[in-house]
Image (cartoon, rainbow, N blue to C red):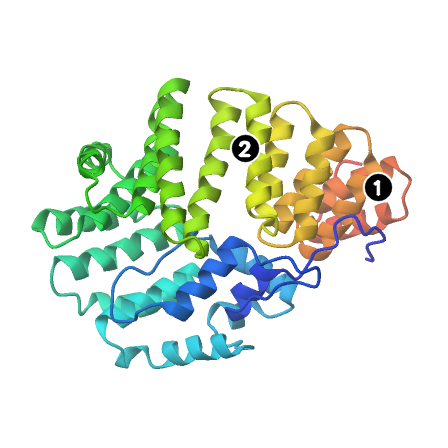
Amino acid sequence: MTVTSERATTARNAFQQTMVGLECVTDATGQRPDIFSQASVEAFEHTDWQRFGYRFTQVFEPSVLQEVAVLEGVPHDDLAWLRHRPTTAARRLGDLVDGHAELGFVEQVNLASVLINLARHDLAETVLTRAAARADGSRERFEVAWLEFMISNRREDGRTSGPAFAAMRQAITEGGVPPHRTLDACTQAVVWYLKRQEVPAEDFHWSVRVGNAIATRQAGLDPSGLSSWYRGLAMLPAAKGLPQQTRAYMEAARSAAEETVRQQASRAYELNLLKTYHESALKEHMYVTKDRDRAIEAGRALIDLDPAWSVSYGELAEGYRRFGSPREAAELYDTAARTGPPYVGHHLMMAASCWEQVGEPEAALADYLTLTELVPGNADVLSKGARCARRLSHPAAATLHAALERLTGRSDGR
């Protein structure tokens, strides 16, 4: 099935390069790679393998790597288990994995961290299991549990996040875990309790108390950790619909992020704190203040800061959609899809839905057809695409309907 529209042609962007080969380059237009990709490459290149504290900007779920494998034209298992090593950096990482049994404990923890950063969660667990058997002392047990929490959070929908956090809390209680790492753990507990109750309520309340105590002292504390803490803490009044208290915490998060950037202006990791502030501000104004203009302003600031990041366009699109502007949303979702991964499939599906909503089925069909190439066996895509094509008397209708019947053994309700 050939896609005849260029509406959502997907770029092989820096994110895809990074997830495949841990390298990213400036594209043909001279645009810098997105912040996540820059930060990931910098972290791998400059990490001190003998020290804890590998810096994450964002951790993705396994489906993101599956999408990259499709776009790259590489079998998923070859990508997930690092059998595909197309670059110098990928070969270096693969050599570390091959010899991970001979690495020291801290090196194993850092290697697992790199793999989690690149959504190789199963492979990371393999390395981490060997490290966990060697953990000796509260700090070592904390660092293992920290990574176990991340893997559970992204790979298993949090089913083992509670025990992982309990191990972190126990290590903190024993002593030997630095305040900035304790604050990191408290931030995760607050965020993921409020999002989907991945830790018990008692651990959540403990994290609020301990995190606040650390943040209040502040002396010598890395402002990057403070920014993340206050952004997470803002979710508390936000959940209660309290805009002034939410904004106060968000201002503290922004101030700490700006201070971090002033201290390390050239590092992508620090810029990511500002990016995540704008993402949170966009959601704040969508769901708490319900202020359309401020939400759009936050989304535009997000794009200005990281124009190569497809998700930035998708975030702003969601703002327009929520405030009743589906045409603007559709255009931005399509821009997100053209910008490339992550979430190409989601952006295309949302764009198609919005195009149908504004009465432009031709544009919607172009996105559905692109989706059939990306996820050829998806019943929802085939069904919606077939119905859209029939409304247009488009020749693709019969092909899509036949593909759906082969997949499901039933009609789509025509």
Report crowding for label 2: few under 14, some 14 to 19, many 20 or more residues within 10 A (C-alpha).
many
Closer to viewer: mark 2 or mark 1: 2
Q: In the image, what residue occupies the spot 45% across and 49% down?
A: 271
Q: Compute the Cα span from label 2 to label 1.
A: 37 Å
Q: In the image, what residue occupies the spot 46% across and 53% down?
A: 60
Q: Nearer the viewer, residue 364 or 270?
A: 270
Q: Nearer the viewer, residue 308 or 371?
A: 308
State whether residue 46 appears in this view: yes
> Which residue does the numbered mark 1 point to in the structure image?
389
- Residue 202, located in which quarter of the rendered image? top left
Report crowding for label 1: few under 14, some 14 to 19, many 20 or more residues within 10 A (C-alpha).
many
Label 2 SS? helix
Residue 125 horizontal side relative to residue 202, left or right: right
Report the disc number at residue 298: 2
**x and y percent of residue 212 in the render?**
21, 33
Say what amino acid the circle numbered 2 marks. Ala
Say what amino acid the circle numbered 1 marks. Ala
* Residue, far left: 174
Image quarter in which the N terminus is found: bottom right
